[in-house]
Amino acid sequence: MTEFLLGSACAILVVVAVGLVRLLRGPGEADRMMAVQLLGTGSTAVMLIFGAVIRQPAVIDVALIVALLSAFAGLAFVRGISPNSGGGDE
Amino acid sequence: MLLDLWTIVLVSMGVVFFLAGTVGLLRFPDALSRLHALTKADNLGLGLVVIGLLPRLTGIADGAKMIFVWLLVMLSGACLAQLVAHLIRQSGDFKP
């Protein structure tokens, strides 16, 4: 059972690594940001799987933090690219 | 035994959705369709993994926390998708 979970965690990591090709090749900044967003969610999923495998509920908090940080990263990207759109009055 | 089957089926479906979303992210021609594929992979793949892992946890609080992580990712994914889509449309390479 744990081998299956660890295998699926590795599968998710491989899939996310393949998805990062879009980071290198992406024509626009938005495409690159999407690859980072996928990395954030993929690592959250892997964290949750590890938390379930080693039966340590503290790892779920780590996954929560990773999800939060990837949300902030996306937000920082959007604000950074177009500070004057949407009435951004810093 | 049933719970193990439940976990195996759902976690593997989650991985399949991650794969589908990533292939969509790589193959789709337009930035907006890539965004669509990415957001689907995020929420659905992670959601299936979370539901698959629920029976393995002992406490109710841990399960609730896992569901909360999934809700947070869904919420942030939805908001970010709107913002990035606005950015893509604004930057002009959007062909109506």
Image (spheres, helix red, strand yellow):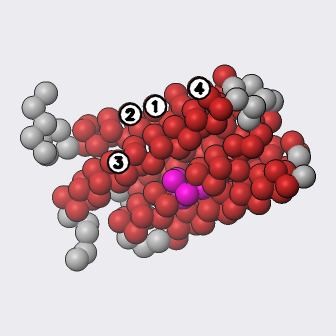
Per the rendered image, the range of residues in magenta is B41-45
How would you rate the neighbour count of disc 3 (Cα within 10 Å): few for under 14, some for 14-19, many for 20 or more?
Answer: many
Where in the figure is residue B25, as x and y percent of width and height? 50, 63
Which type of secondary structure does the marked residue at label 4 adopt? helix
Q: Main secondary structure of the magenta part?
A: helix
Q: Which residue is mark 1?
A: A69
Q: Choose the circle earlier in sequence order: 4 or 1.
A: 4
* CA neighbours of label 4 inside 10 A, class few (<14), some (14 to 19), many (20+): some
Q: Which mark is residue B38?
A: none
Q: Amino acid at mark 4?
A: Asp
State whether residue B93 is above or below residue A71: below
Per the image, the residue denoted by label 4 is A61
Q: Which mark is residue B80?
A: 3
Residue at the extreme front: B60
Q: Nearer the viewer, residue A62 or B93?
A: A62
| Dots 1 and 3 on the same chain | no
Chain identity of mark 2? A
Contact, CB < 8 Å: mark 2 with mark 1?
Answer: yes
